Image: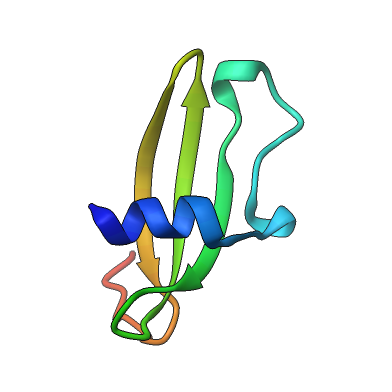
Amino acid sequence: EREIQEILINGTINYKKSALQVGDCQKKYAVEGLTADQQRVRVIFAPCAEEVTVVTCIDLGKEWACNCQ
């Protein structure tokens, strides 16, 4: 949880991966940065009113297998 807060505060917004051309409570910010243990991550934040929801966290340094059909 602390690392996610650090990404929110110190990370960089990736505008290409963000969804900002929508209504206020539908916006999603893709914020990238390094964790304390040097993992490069992208965290998707969805702010609405006084709250910020973490949608997902993606490890950018690892390719994950996809079982998509």
- Quadrant where the image shows the C terminus: bottom left
Counting from the top left corner in percent of width and height, residue 57 is at: 35, 58
Q: Residue furthest top?
A: 49
Q: How many numbered circles are shown? A: 0
Q: Is residue 49 left or right of residue 35?
A: right
Counting from the top left corner in percent of width and height, residue 47 is at: 50, 28
Taking depth in this image into account, of 66 and 52 the one nearest to the observer is 52
> How is the model colour-coded?
rainbow
- Residue drawn at (67%, 17%) of the image: 23
Q: Is residue 14 left or right of residue 38?
A: right
Taking depth in this image into account, of 28 and 66 the one nearest to the observer is 28
30 vs 64: above or below: above
Q: Is residue 13 left or right of residue 61?
A: right
Taking depth in this image into account, of 24 and 50 the one nearest to the observer is 50
29 vs 17: above or below: above
45 vs 35: above or below: above
**In terms of image quadrants, where is residue 28?**
top right
- Residue drawn at (34%, 55%) of the image: 4
52 vs 64: above or below: above
Taking depth in this image into account, of 50 and 53 the one nearest to the observer is 50
Counting from the top left corner in percent of width and height, residue 21 is at: 76, 31
- Residue drawn at (41%, 86%) of the image: 61
Counting from the top left corner in percent of width and height, residue 25 is at: 55, 18
